[in-house]
């Protein structure tokens, strides 16, 4: 059996078991956690195979490409599937510290696995219409997770989230219609042999702009990011964590995949716009973060701002910048998921994440503070943590590509991030809280946080090999012939 | 025929976007529905319209003779209609929940005055 189908089939299986199993909370949590463990093993297996044998391809149903649906894993997709599994592990682990009973009764654990399936599917598919379907799987699961709330602010946020994402899906679908009408293909590898070979006309430019808009909304890029800070601070911490860690990254991944395959270097206006967009996203996100007074809203704006970093690579299109962006994506998934989970501690202790109510953590609960310090300062880019290494790689990539403005913006925005994170740290951990908290903290709540902090530390220690992997992924992306050959001619490529 | 369908799809997109600019939930949802159907019609039209030529290989031939009606856009539209229907049903239920709870369907008033 081909391992490529596992990251999609296993979460589906787990979700089905969770639906059928008796709805006793503890049993559901254990099944969910076990499912995430198996998924992690499968993801690592896929990664090891890809690392050893090159791009891995599975033609579903035995239909040769481009007639059937193809699953493809290159180094980037495999790394992201591993990251997805790790986030899944952390989020299912966090369920042991308690889930709102109402949500647990409504199939919370199953939905988490459906979401993981959608994300893995989006990373692994080699077919654009199939990508649309995975987007919808992911979105419907996230809609239900988001809307299982019953306060007015949460419902308002859920509706904004649903509406904006549906508009993006319709745009994506429209683009696919135009794409199929003009080329007769939807398989990405086949499209990569058709579109770049053509004379660049208005048709290609329109397609590129539509893709940019549709993925731009999904990835929460400037100027289409407003739905994210309007909604991500309302769901419970674990749901916010899985959304922040994975959903926008799928948008970024789609941009990287589609633009490197379908529009390599051409049309130029696409890359100019993308670079400008990345710059504006960074600035607006971090300036927005400085104006916020709530732990999770600060995180939301930081998330938006740092999505700019993750698209600099594809906008510049050089190997070094792309590797920097890939490294940054991996670092950011671990750090931001962790920070949202940490906001769960505040929700439990103080029932709010407003900065004015927080504080005293460092003095009263030093262990929490030490574990939290790792993602906070990693996101801030304090050396030697992984965020610093990611930013260094990006700055070097930008200056190497002679993009002085972009490099300058990256540096300036790093300073803003540092400022924002320092403020977050001193307000929520360092200062003396206005009220004393007496609630007890279950030790199990620290497990997923410790797990993700350990991953961040591991990324720092193993930054060299990880950067080599990012370099390998970026070389594969910038050399689409490898991908095309693997899909259309079959067989793993060295 | 392509021209008529293209105009129809354009009208659906236009009215859909117009309705989404309103502040009422019901209109927003109708707008979303129109938009997704505009996209469906566009896929169907862009795939090329061929009348009465089923994509079936003739008995004495080994290949499909052109022109034939391309089945792929129809399969895509079918998938998209099903997904769109499910998502629309979900947003209607969500809007109903919001209306029951907040007593208003003005998007700007939902969040204010909440718990």
Image: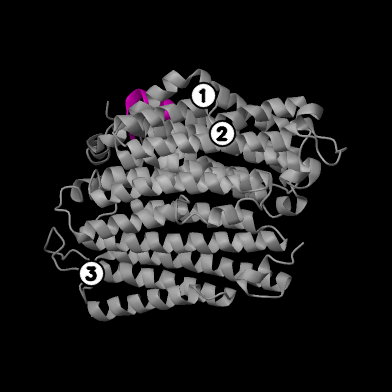
Position of the C terminus of chain B by quadrant? bottom right
> Mark 1 or 2 closer to N-term?
2
The residue drawn where x is 22% and y is 66% is B55
Looking at the image, which residue sits at the far left? B60
Q: Secondary structure at mark 3?
A: loop
Position of the N terminus of chain B by quadrant? bottom left
Left or right for A482, reference A375: left
Q: Secondary structure at mark 1?
A: helix
Q: Chain of mark 1?
A: A
| Circle 2 residues within 10 Å: few <14, some 14–19, many ≥20 | many
The residue drawn where x is 68% and y is 73% is B99
| Circle 1 residues within 10 Å: few <14, some 14–19, many ≥20 | many
Q: Secondary structure at mark 2?
A: helix
Tell me the residue that label 3 is attached to. Answer: B48
Residue A141 shows in this picture: no
Which mark is on residue A40?
Answer: none
Which mark is on residue A459?
Answer: 1
Label 1 and label 3: CA atoms lie apart by 51 Å
Same subunit, labels 3 and 2: the answer reads no
Which mark is on residue A418?
Answer: 2
Q: Is residue A51 magenta?
A: yes
């Amino acid at each position: 059996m081909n391992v490529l189908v596992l990251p999609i089939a296993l979460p589906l299986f787990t979700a089905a078991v969770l639906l059928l199993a008796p709805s006793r909370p503890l049993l559901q949590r254990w099944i969910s956690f076990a499912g995430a463990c198996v998924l992690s093993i499968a993801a690592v297996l896929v990664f090891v195979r890809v690392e050893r044998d090159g791009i891995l391809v599975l033609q579903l149903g035995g239909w040769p490409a481009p007639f059937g649906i193809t699953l493809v894993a290159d180094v980037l997709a495999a790394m992201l599937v591993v990251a997805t599994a790790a986030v899944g592990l952390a989020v299912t682990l966090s369920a042991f510290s308690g889930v709102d009973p109402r949500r647990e009764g409504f199939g919370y654990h199953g939905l988490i696995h459906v979401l993981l399936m959608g994300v893995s599917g989006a990373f692994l598919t080699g077919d654009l219409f199939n990508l649309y379907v995975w987007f919808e799987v992911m979105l419907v699961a996230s809609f239900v997770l988001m809307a299982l709330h019953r306060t007015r602010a949460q419902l308002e946020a859920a509706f904004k989230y649903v509406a904006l994402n549906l508009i993006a899906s319709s745009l994506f679908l429209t683009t696919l219609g135009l794409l199929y009408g003009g080329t007769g293909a939807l398989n990405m590898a086949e499209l990569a042999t058709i579109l770049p070979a053509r004379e660049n006309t208005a048709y290609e430019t329109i397609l590129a702009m539509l893709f940019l808009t549709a993925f731009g909304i999904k990835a929460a890029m400037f100027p289409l990011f407003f739905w994210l800070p309007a909604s991500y601070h309302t769901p419970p911490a674990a749901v916010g964590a899985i959304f922040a860690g994975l959903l926008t990254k799928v948008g970024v991944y789609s941009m990287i995949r589609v633009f490197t395959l379908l529009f390599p270097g051409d049309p130029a206006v696409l890359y100019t716009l993308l670079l400008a967009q990345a710059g504006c996203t960074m600035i607006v996100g971090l300036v927005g973060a400085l104006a916020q007074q709530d732990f999770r809203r600060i995180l939301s704006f930081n998330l938006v701002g740092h999505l700019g970093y993750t698209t600099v690579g594809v906008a510049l299109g050089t190997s070094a910048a792309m590797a920097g962006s890939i490294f940054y994506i991996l670092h950011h998934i671990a750090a931001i998921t962790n920070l949202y989970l940490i906001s769960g501690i505040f929700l439990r202790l103080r029932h709010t994440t407003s900065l004015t109510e927080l504080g005293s953590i460092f003095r009263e609960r030093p262990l929490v503070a030490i574990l939290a310090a790792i993602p906070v300062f990693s996101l801030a880019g304090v050396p030697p943590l992984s965020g610093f290494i990611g930013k260094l790689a990006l700055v070097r990539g930008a200056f190497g590509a002679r993009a002085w403005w972009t490099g300058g913006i990256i540096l300036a925005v790093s300073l803003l991030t540092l400022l924002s994170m320092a403020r977050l740290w001193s307000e929520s951990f360092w200062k003396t809280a206005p009220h004393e908290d007496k609630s007890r903290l279950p030790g199990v709540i620290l497990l997923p946080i410790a797990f993700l902090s350990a991953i961040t530390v591991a990324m720092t220690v193993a930054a060299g090999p990880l950067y080599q992997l990012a370099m390998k992924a970026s070389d594969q992306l910038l050399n689409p012939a490898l991908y095309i050959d693997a899909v259309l001619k079959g067989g793993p490529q060295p | 025929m392509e021209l008529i369908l293209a105009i129809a799809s354009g009208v659906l997109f236009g009215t859909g976007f117009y309705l989404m600019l309103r502040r009422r939930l019901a209109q927003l949802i109708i707008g979303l529905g129109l938009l997704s159907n505009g996209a469906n019609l566009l896929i169907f039209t862009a795939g090329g319209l061929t009348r009465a030529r089923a994509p079936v290989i003739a008995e004495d031939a080994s290949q499909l003779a052109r022109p034939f009606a391309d089945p792929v856009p129809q399969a895509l539209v079918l998938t998209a209609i099903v997904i769109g229907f499910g998502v629309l049903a979900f947003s209607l239920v969500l809007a109903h929940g919001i209306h029951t709870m907040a007593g208003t369907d003005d998007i700007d008033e939902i969040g204010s005055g909440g718990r």
